[in-house]
Image (tube, helix red, strand yellow):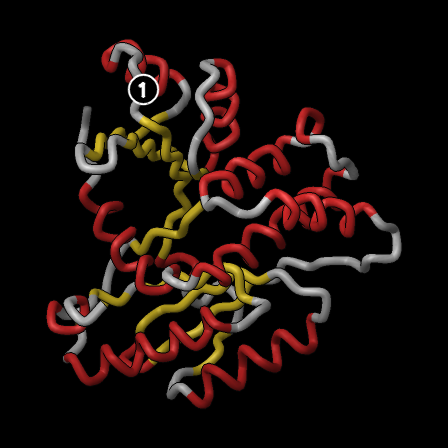
Amino acid sequence: MAGHNKWSKIKRKKGVLDAKRSKIFSRILKEISVAVKEGASGDPDFNPRLRLALANAKGANLPKENIERAIKKALESDSGALYQPTYEGYAPGGVAVFLECTTDNLKRTIASVRATFSKGGGNLATSGSVDFLFERKGFFVIPRGSYDVEELELELIEGGAEEIELDEESSEITVTVDFGDFGNMQKKLEDLKLEPSSATLERIPTTTVNLDAETAHKALQLVETLEDDDDVQQVFHNLEMPPEIEAQH
């Protein structure tokens, strides 16, 4: 199986931001709500996006009662609309930052995001300013089972796999696909009766920015503050963290 060291490094960096369990739960619950509203169904058998969100919830060990409550609330007609805006900007040192949000109040969210950029020494930019610096990829993590590895690899390639990485420590397989093949791989795994422990769409930087430790620390502080915003689902950046800072996390 081919390795995917680039994603392994990105996962470690994202771990700095994803370390807060409550934030992970909040992110998944919002995704469940959006999936239910968008698909007008609380039945995962008839709602592929919800099925995917529930797989991520299971992988994160999200309590069943929390999931059921989120589905029920989303099905209520008066529960309010949810929007998924994206914002782009720059952190100190010219680090490109891309935000994916989920909110019921667009004015509140943009005001909060703009204030965070300003206080953190960065600036909010216009749409399209940094989007081109990232490529969208899908990542599926599946448990290493007793199946034949070579046969599985052929099946995954048929489903659109670009990279297949086996992590010997966790006994998990990470499959990378192009954004356009995300749905194809989801269907392929369902056909193979393989349930992923997580399935996510990420924005991978095509180029990275190298900074001195002090400036990198300021940029990372801004990114972490944005990550703490309740309306922010995902924060992507192209900072290549200096070893001394990476070692602190």
Q: Residues within 10 Å of mark 1 (few under 14, many from 20)?
A: few
View extreme (left): residue: 243
Q: Is residue 244 above or below residue 208?
A: below
> Which quarter of the image is occupied by the C terminus?
bottom left
Q: Residue at x 39, y 24 (%)?
A: 160
Tell me which residue sits at (62%, 37%) in the image: 49
Name the foreground residue: 16 vs 146.
146
Query: Which type of secondary structure does the marked residue at label 1 adopt?
Result: loop
Q: Position of residue 65 (x, y in %)?
A: 65, 46
Residue 208 image position (x, y, % from top left): 23, 62
Image: 179 above or below 95: above
Image point (46%, 73%), residue name: 226
Between 7 and 73, the one lying in front of the other is 73
- Residue 68 screen position, x and y as percent: 69, 44
User: Which residue matches tag 1?
Assistant: 145
Where residue 224 sits, quadrant-wise, is bottom left
Residue 243 found in image quarter: bottom left
Which kind of residue does numbered mark 1 sit on? Answer: Gly
- Foreground residue among 159 and 73: 73
Q: Position of residue 186 (x, y in %)?
A: 49, 27
